[in-house]
Amino acid sequence: MAGFWREHVVKKLERSSGWSKVRNAFVKKNNRCAACGKKKSWKLGLQVHHVVPFSVDHTKELDEDNLITLCEKHHLWMGHLGFFQSWNPDVREDCAIMLHKVLNRPSKKKRKAWSKQFWDMFTPKSK
């Protein structure tokens, strides 16, 4: 499905010449999936998702406030609600809920040390 979307829909929309640079810088700075916390390189599965698709508002294509990093699985399910021709306007909130559940799931094993630090990055600081 993702291949069809990219081949038939995205190719028809002209990407900005600056997209690759913005995408690479964004994933370098935000190098974990916002939904599950997995850390991968962009080439190994992290993708940059537009909260408001650039096909809906092309002026937001390079706006970092309109981007979120997701792994391949969560790009489809959290970003597009299981259908690449759709989008999730609540993707940030849904990912925060999912990440909280992932980082606080019951387990007999001790959580990795990075999980608290990672969660703190997404938790608003109280004044």
Image (cartoon, rainbow, N blue to C red):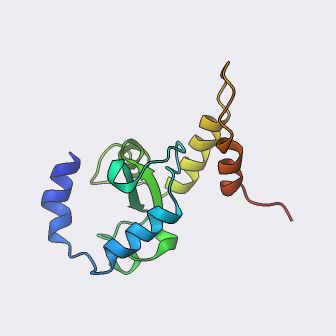
User: In the rendered image of this protein, does residue 3 appear above or below residue 126?
Assistant: above
Rendered location of residue 60, percent (x, y): 41, 76
- Give the residue at x 39% y 68%: 23
Rendered location of residue 84, percent (x, y): 28, 51
- Give the residue at x 36% y 48%: 45
- Give the residue at x 51% y 51%: 32
- Give the residue at x 14% y 58%: 7
Q: Is residue 124 left or right of residue 75?
A: right
Viewer-closest of 68 and 24: 24
Image quadrant holding the C terminus, namely: bottom right
User: In the rendered image of this protein, does residue 24 appear above or below residue 7?
Assistant: below
Viewer-closest of 21 and 82: 21
Rendered location of residue 39, percent (x, y): 49, 47
Image quadrant holding the N terminus, namely: top left
Viewer-closest of 5 and 22: 22
Rendered location of residue 94, percent (x, y): 54, 48
Q: Is residue 85 left or right of residue 106?
A: left
Q: Is residue 12 left or right of residue 37?
A: left
Q: How many marks?
A: 0
User: In the rendered image of this protein, does residue 40 appear above or below residue 121?
Assistant: above
Q: Residue furthest top?
A: 108
